[in-house]
Amino acid sequence: MHLQSSAMPIGIDFGASGVKMVQLRPVKGGFAAVDFARIASPTTPTDLSSPEGIVRLVAAVRRRIEGGRFVGRRCVVSLDDRLLRVRSVRHPRMTDEETDRAVRLDAGARLGFSEHEALEVGWLRAGEVRQGDELREEVLIVGCPRGPVEMLVMELARCGLRAEAVEPGFQACARVFGRTLRRAEDQSLVRVLIDIGWRSTGVIITRGRSVGFFKPLEMGGAVLNEAVGQRLGLDASAVADLRRQRMTEGSASTIDRKVDRAVFEAVRPLLGELAREVALCLRYYGVTFRGARPEECLLVGGESREPRLTELVADELRVTTNLGRPLHGVLPGDEASGARDADLAVAAGLGLREWEQADNKRVGRRPGEARRSAEGTPGQGAPGGKEAA
C-alpha cells in the first residue's frame, strides 16, 4: 500500500453519546480529511452491550459511509470506555513474550472479572519505575468482555465493513496528538489529555507518543445535565438544548446572563471535582515517574467545550490548559474554525493507526500501542490493538 496516495482506514469511535467517524489521507506535510461524520446525540445514548444496540449503530454507520465521501470499507474501531477496565501493575523488566505470559496469568482477577468470563485483554508499557533499589516496569493492563467485541466485528463484517483492529479510545486519543512529535527531544514531552464524554471522562497522561497513565472517571455530560435540570427545574430536552447552545461557538451571547450564570453555578461543583481528580492523577504520575511535569493540558471530547472549564482545570493543575484541536489544519471550512473538532480526537486517532505503524517501522521506533495477548482463551485476549479477523 502506498500511504502517500491512499486513504487510510475509517476511524469509528463508538461512544456513549453516539458514533464519530473520521477518514484521513496523507498529503505532503500532513494529512487531509477524506470525510467525517457524527451519528446520534446525547439525548439518545448508545448501547454496545446488547445485540440490538450494535445492529442499530452499525446500520447507521453503513448508511453514513454509503451516503458520504468515505473511501473503501476498511476501519479501525474503539469501544465505549465504560466497557473497559484498566489497572497498573509493576513487573521486573522482561521481554514482550515474558510480559505477555505474566499478564495472562491473572489478568481477569486483577481487573475484577470472574474466572469463567470470556475476556479480551491487552497491555502496554507505561514506563520504568524505581522501587527501592530495584528498577521495575509499570504495565497498563486493559480488559473488556469478549461478547461486545465479537458482536461488533461480526456485525460490521455483515454490513461489508472490515474491522482491521479494535483498540481502546485512550490509545487513539494519545496517537492523534502525538503525530507531530517527531524529534528525539519531543519524546520527553509530557501532556495531560482529558477526554470528557457523555457518561465518563478519560484522564490520559502521555510522554512523547507513549501512554504513561490512564484512568476513567465516572463523570460526564449526563451528570452535568442532571445538575442543571435540578437547579433550573427543566426537563432533559430543554437542558440538553441549553447546554448545547452554551457550548456552541458564537451562541453563548444569545443566552440570558442570569440563565447562563445559573447553569454555571449548577455545574461548577462537578467541574471542580473533575479538576481535583485530574490533579490526583497527575500527582500519582509525578511520584511514580520521578517528577515528570506536564507542559500542557488539552481538553477533548463532546463535553470539553463547557464554558470556563479550561480556566478551572488550569487553576487546579497550574498547567497551561487549552481546548484540544486534534484536526487543526486538516478539516475544511467552518468545521476548522473555533474548536469544533474536539470530539473527533478518538476517531481521528483510530484512523491514524496504520500511519503510526508505518512510521514506527520506518524510523525503527518501538511501538507504543497495547500488545495483544498471545491466546484467546477465557480470561485472555486483546482489546488494545486487537487485530480483527
Image (cartoon, rainbow, N blue to C red):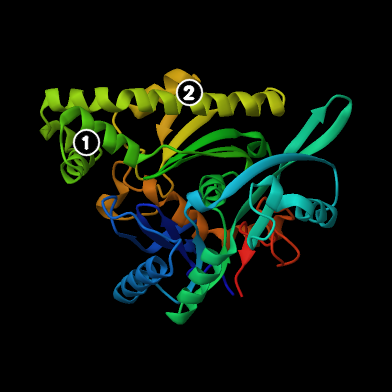
Measured as percent of width and height from the top left, residue 164 is found at 57, 70
Q: Amino acid at mark 1?
A: Arg
State the mark number for residue 151: none
Q: Amino acid at mark 2?
A: Arg
- Extreme residue toward the right, this view: 133
Measured as percent of width and height from the top left, residue 175 is found at 55, 50
* Among the 4 quarters of the image, the one containing residue 360: bottom right
Residue at 46 percent across and 58 percent down: it is: 31
In whole angstroms, how far apart are the C-alphas of marks 2 and 1?
23 Å
Total count of labels: 2
How dense is the environment of label 2, judged by Cα within 10 Å: few (below 14), some, or many (20 and up)? some
Q: Is residue 76 left or right of residue 15?
A: right
User: Element under label 2?
Assistant: helix
Q: Which residue is mark 2?
A: 276
Q: Is residue 73 left or right of residue 38?
A: right
Q: Nearer the viewer, residue 101 or 113?
A: 113
Q: Is residue 12 visible?
A: yes
Q: Is residue 70 above or below residue 344?
A: below
Q: Which residue is mark 1?
A: 246
Measured as percent of width and height from the top left, residue 363 is found at 71, 55
User: Element under label 1?
Assistant: helix
Q: Is residue 73 above or below residue 136?
A: below
Pick the quarter of the image with the N terminus. Answer: bottom right
| Residue contact at pointers 2 and 1, CB within 8 angstroms | no
Q: Nearer the viewer, residue 15 or 48?
A: 48
Q: Is residue 294 visible?
A: no
* Dot 2 or dot 1, earlier in sequence: 1
